[in-house]
């Protein structure tokens, strides 16, 4: 297995507070890897560091052997590591299709000036963006809502829109931020299938941060568990379920979100 | 098309009939101010309130005046250079300040106009408070013996010529603006305006686009200012003041931030409105302000929203 993404001894300090302490793990190509942990375990911070939305205090993140930590987010996105957000982060006054077209920015071949003058290359881009947007929305089962305004969508569709925007950039690694939060069982299972097909049919490696335990257990090839900023376990869903430290972390923290 | 016809044929005929030749100067000013306002509108498009367009107009006016008077260049060469110089200044100033948002950015741009005014007062090349006066009128341009632009200096009345020049420039500006907003740059601006985090996650280089747009905005400001200087044949540090910067912004508000042609209408109404209310004497400011407040209160999306709403009801 080749390691596509490597997190090496990453630490994040906010003043005296250590949000992530010396965390290391690898993500293999075509894997679905979940990062879980009780509230405040440092999942989100870790996630932000991988997508370079915040710098690391020490340590580094490598993508295909190349350092991607402490760069600008748009450069990391350009290399193929793209994050999604929770549902409120969308382009509110664009339609679903417009959002997906805009998100194909990275695939553009013509220059900005080319678009201004309407060059051949730009026109070609515009046609291909439209086609790809339709294809992608079809694939995600969103074709029927492609002309809806994003701000009018219900929560479940917003989450799917976030994934559509992420996928439109043609990523190699997609980082999903709590894709199942606030969903009921049926919605969650639909989303699980969607994330799986993203990996299976598009060859995208998926790294996700999640609270929803049953979903994580179903979807993940491997799981990383964080607690108080430390990595306490790593393994297959089965191994994690039996891990003493993990059980202790969840039961001991009086966290009611375990749902196991 | 109707609009072009009105501007180039209708208005001159009307002025001929009524004999109000002073309207040419008013309308020329409106056209030029609308160009500068277009720039301000564009900065609104990246989610920044720009109250500094007066600074770039002043810079443009001085650059053009200096090139024409001291270096003896043709006005038509100095015009794009004035815009470019304003754009370069915008890049230098924009690099540090475009990180600021909302009120903070607005405050800095507000100060900018004052800074440029003071600089113009202090520098030897701008001639201090005396300014640069008796700027020669634009000379003719010939290409391969063919006269493209006639010499303004030999004309009996330059009013019509300046009117046409200003209108052509304005139409070019708005055509460019319309094109810009509907091209990829415009789409990227919209994505940034709505959500910067998400925009950067899809690979948009936010700071680059911001600088680029601010430079284009200031280019328009520089062009408008340079043309203004040429028409009045003089530039003073007080040619564009903080109040002018504020007016450029008001034009955008009044016309409607959601419409490309908003600032054009806004400039027309605001400029004419002020003149019409002149009859009221000392109450001019009071009535004017009340009307402005009413418009902003009842038509928060600007005057153009009125027309569109009507259209939707039909």
Image (tube, rainbow, N blue to C red):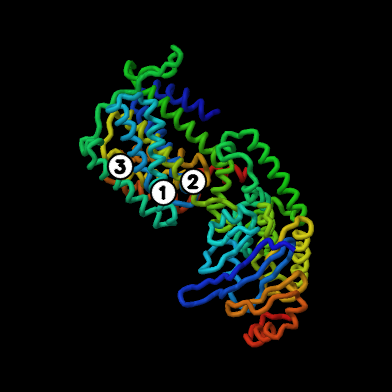
* Residue B256, numbered label: 2
Q: How many marks?
A: 3
Label 3: how many Cα within 10 Å (few below 14, some 14–19, many 20+): few
* Mark toward the viewer: 2 or 1: 1
Front disc: 3 or 2:
2
Is A41 drawn above or below residue A79 in the view shown?
below
If you read the primary sequence from the N terminus, does the residue marked by circle 1 or circle 3 appear first?
A: 1
Label 2 element class: loop
Percent coordinates x, y for residue A13 in the rendering? 50, 73
Same chain shared by disc 1 and disc 3: yes
Residue at 47%, 22% (x, y): give it.
Answer: B9
Query: Which numbered marker is on residue B94?
Result: 1
B190, above or below A50, in the image: above
Alpha-carbon span between mark 2 and mark 1? 25 Å
The answer to whether one can see residue A65 in this image is yes
Nearer the N terminus, badge 2 or badge 1? 1
Q: Indicate the quadrant where residue B284 lies.
A: top left
Q: Nearer the viewer, residue A32 or A134?
A: A32
- 2 and 1 marks in contact (CB < 8 Å): no
Chain containing the residue with disc 1: B
Give x and y (percent) for residue B194.
Answer: 55, 55
**Label 3, label 2: how many angstroms apart (C-alpha)?**
27 Å
């Amino acid at each position: 297995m080749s390691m596509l993404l490597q997190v090496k001894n990453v630490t994040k300090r906010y003043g005296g507070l250590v949000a992530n302490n010396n965390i290391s793990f690898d993500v293999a190509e075509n894997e679905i890897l979940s990062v879980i942990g009780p509230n405040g375990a440092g999942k989100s911070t870790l996630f932000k560091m991988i997508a370079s939305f915040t710098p690391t205090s020490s340590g580094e993140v490598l993508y295909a052997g190349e350092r991607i930590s402490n760069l600008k987010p748009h450069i990391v996105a350009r290399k193929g590591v793209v994050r999604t957000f929770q549902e409120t982060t969308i382009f509110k006054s664009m339609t679903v299709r417009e959002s997906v077209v805009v998100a194909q920015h990275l695939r553009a071949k013509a220059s900005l000036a080319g678009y201004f003058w309407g060059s051949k290359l730009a026109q070609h881009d515009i046609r291909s963006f439209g086609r790809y947007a339709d294809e992608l929305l079809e694939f995600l089962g969103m074709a029927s809502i492609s002309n809806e305004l994003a701000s009018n969508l219900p929560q479940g569709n917003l989450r799917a829109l976030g994934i559509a925007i992420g996928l439109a950039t043609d990523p190699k690694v997609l980082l999903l931020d709590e894709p199942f939060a606030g969903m009921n069982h049926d919605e969650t299972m639909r989303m699980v299938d969607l994330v799986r097909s993203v990996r299976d049919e598009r060859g995208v490696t998926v790294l996700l941060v999640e609270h929803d335990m049953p979903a994580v257990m179903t979807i993940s090839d491997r799981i990383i568990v964080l607690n108080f900023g430390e990595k306490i376990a790593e393994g297959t869903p089965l191994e994690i379920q039996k891990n003493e430290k993990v059980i202790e972390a969840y039961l001991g923290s009086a966290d009611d979100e375990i749902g196991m | 098309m109707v609009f072009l016809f009105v501007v180039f044929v209708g208005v001159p005929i009307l002025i001929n009939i009524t004999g109000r030749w002073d309207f040419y100067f008013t309308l020329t000013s409106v056209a030029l101010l609308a160009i500068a306002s277009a720039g301000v509108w564009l900065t609104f498009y990246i989610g920044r309130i720009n109250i500094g367009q007066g600074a770039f107009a002043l810079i443009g006016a001085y650059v053009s005046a200096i090139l024409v008077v001291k270096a003896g260049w043709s006005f038509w060469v100095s015009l794009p250079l004035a815009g470019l110089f304003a754009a370069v200044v915008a890049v230098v100033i924009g690099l540090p300040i475009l990180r600021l948002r909302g009120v903070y950015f607005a405050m800095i741009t507000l100060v900018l106009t004052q800074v440029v005014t003071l600089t113009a007062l202090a520098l030897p090349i701008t001639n201090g408070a005396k300014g640069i006066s008796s700027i020669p009128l634009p000379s003719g341009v010939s290409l391969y013996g063919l006269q493209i632009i006639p010499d303004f200096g030999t004309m009996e009345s330059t009013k019509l010529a300046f009117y046409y020049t200003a209108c052509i420039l304005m139409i070019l500006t708005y055509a460019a603006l319309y094109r810009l907003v509907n091209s990829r740059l415009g789409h990227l601006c919209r994505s940034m305006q709505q959500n910067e985090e998400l925009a950067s996650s899809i690979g948009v280089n936010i700071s680059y686009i911001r600088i680029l747009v601010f430079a284009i905005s200031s280019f328009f400001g520089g062009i408008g200012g340079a043309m203004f200087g040429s028409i009045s044949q003089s530039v003073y540090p007080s040619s564009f003041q903080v109040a002018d910067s504020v007016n450029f912004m008001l034009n955008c508000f009044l016309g409607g931030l959601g419409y490309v042609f908003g600032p054009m209408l806004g400039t027309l109404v605001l400029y004419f409105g002020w003149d019409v209310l002149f009859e009221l004497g000392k109450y001019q400011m009071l009535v004017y302000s009340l009307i402005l407040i009413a418009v902003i209160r009842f038509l928060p999306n600007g005057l153009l929203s009125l027309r569109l709403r009507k259209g939707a009801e039909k």
